[in-house]
Image (cartoon, helix red, strand yellow):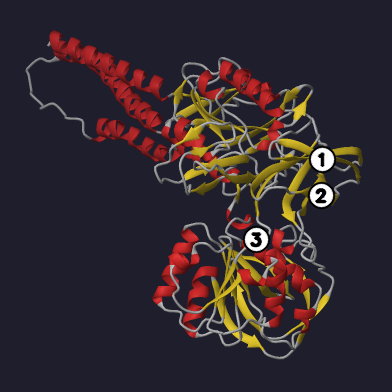
Amino acid sequence: MFNLTFLNSSALILSLSTLIPLLIYLFAKKRPPRIIFSSIRFIQLSEKRQKKKVNLKNLLLLIIRMLIILLTVLAISRPAIKLENLKGNKNHPPTAIALILDNSYSMDYVVDSQTELDKGLQIAETIGGMLTKDDISILLTMEKSWNEQNAGLNFGSFSADALHSIEITSQVEKLGDVISLAEERLKESQIANREIYFVTDLQQQEFTGELESSLYIIPTSALESRQNLSIENAFISSNFVERGSERQIEFQVVNNSDNPVDDVICSLTLDGTTVAEQVTDLQPEEKQQNSFVILLERPGWHSGYVSVRDERLLYDNRYYFAFYYNQQPRVGIITSESSLPLTLQTILSIYTGNEDNIDIISDNISLENLKDYDNLIVWKYADWSGQLQFVLSNLQQQGQNLLFLADTELNERAREYLAAEFKLEFKNVLEQETMVKLTQVNRYHPVAARLDAERPAAIRGLWQTTTSASVILEAETNPLVIEEAGNLLWLFDVNDLRSAFLVDANYPILAYNSLLYTASSGLGNRQFLAGTLYRPLAEPFIYPDGSSFQTGGRKILLRQPGLYLEGDEKLPLVVNLDYSESRFRNLTLPDDKLITLCDADWQETIFQARYGFELWKYLLLAVLLLFAIEIIIVKSEEKKA
């Protein structure tokens, strides 16, 4: 059985031009002049014999010329014949294939002593062996930077070195974008038969856009569910009532499966030493909040990670943290007021441990005067001139995060500055007391830790705003606390003592967490997600594997999770995952006839030759042959004449 298709079927309309030689033959024949002889019997007999020969020759030339036109039109139409018995083997027609190997971190899951990525590499090698010298191949991954360097066209199979350079990445590009890149590269091949192979563990991916080429999903294993444990959101906290050397490392241990897990071992590694362990049980899909108590004996930087013992998927077993221990931090408040509200003064006294460490700064605002403060707060300052904005901008460039406290009398220049910094729009102030329920929009953010989200609060002096920045807390649907680039903005007035929220148990927790987060040595500017572009503050920049790099002031990609160090002082910087793939969710495929989910016999499914063998080359050869025959016939007649 075979199937014939035309890749440029619109050109078939030109086949009507085949009739042109016939029309010329029928209507444009020249009649010889009539000459009268006295006796023409012998001439008539000779003419009949000659006419038979001429007619036969003319008919042959007519057929040849019509065939030349017809075959030329067919060649332009690019016919392709698809033979059923040539599917998926070495005899398949020339095919351009794009192989996308999933290297997201869920592919690090171990199945039968091999990771899913190892199995994917074996599948890719098998596909490479099925390619012929007439095929074109493209090798892609889910990592944009790898694709930019390696996504070229290969005649025949792709490079084995390129294939085995693929590693697990936490910087995953959208599948739709990778498929679009594959489609673009396949068009460059100028081959009609185009197929895309996505080798994956069937973790949920987002499909966008319309396909032009056939897409074959090739599973690396037959697992439909996975058991995985992960550690998330580890950070330092302390008891803000008792100012001692005791601190807590809070974290979540997560069961990302549908089955309970007993005797889960979690451990804390601090400054290179494992200092504590604990055992817990987890219910299906449970995210359990736990903590380790630590005693800090020296001031300065500390770093480490919380880990869980899980042999299946190692990539998300750790969550890294770093913090600076200073028992008596200095706080500067940039304000035009001569004194602080009681609600703010009380919290700062507890936080600093010494009221002498609290300074009101109303003039001489410069980088030199502000550089030694651990925390800087901007509240109720009248002169939002260019000088203040210049100083605040430079402080942030040097790694200092700021805490902004909005008041009901916020002037226009202050609103303009905050609107630009926090991507928000100020509307109006709720002067009347409003009973609201706090919503932890980002419940695992350090600023929201230990807040009682179910506790209602009565708030006055709340700015109503809309924002595209990160909202940490909401009062009903109105933002209450916003973060942008490590800076925090409170949208309620701390000076209105009629606001019941300021004497609520949630307020001191929020305030203390905010101060810890925005400290110059705090969490706000030392933790990032993998895949972030970061400009180091000092040289050299040291990677988690110990290798160092001189950036020359350029931004670098924080590609992998781990503990990075910068400068001669080796200031720690932590990078963690976004944990989007820790929980396995089975791939849902759109209803598209071009998408095929393969089974264990995937080798019999691919190289389907959607269009088959193209015949235009053979048709053009036939045209050349017919031209040659026509020339031979014409020349032979000329010699006889």
Residue at 73% of width from left, 69% of height from top?
350
Residue 48 visible from this viewpoint: no
Q: Amino acid at mark 3?
A: Tyr
User: Closer to the observer: label 2 or label 3?
Assistant: 2
Q: For the residues labelled 2 and 1, say whether their Cβ atoms are less than 8 Å apart.
A: yes
Secondary structure at numbered mark 1: strand
Amino acid at the residue labelled 2: Val
Q: Tell me the tag on residue 293.
A: 2
Disc ID at residue 18: none
* Amino acid under disc 1: Ala
Q: Nearer the viewer, residue 139 or 355?
A: 355
Q: CA distance from mark 2 to mark 3?
A: 19 Å
- Neighbor class of circle 2 (other Cα within 10 Å; few <14, some 14-19, many 20+) is some
The residue to which callout 3 is attached is: 517
Residue closest to the far bottom: 432
- From what the image shows, is residue 64 above or below residue 77? above
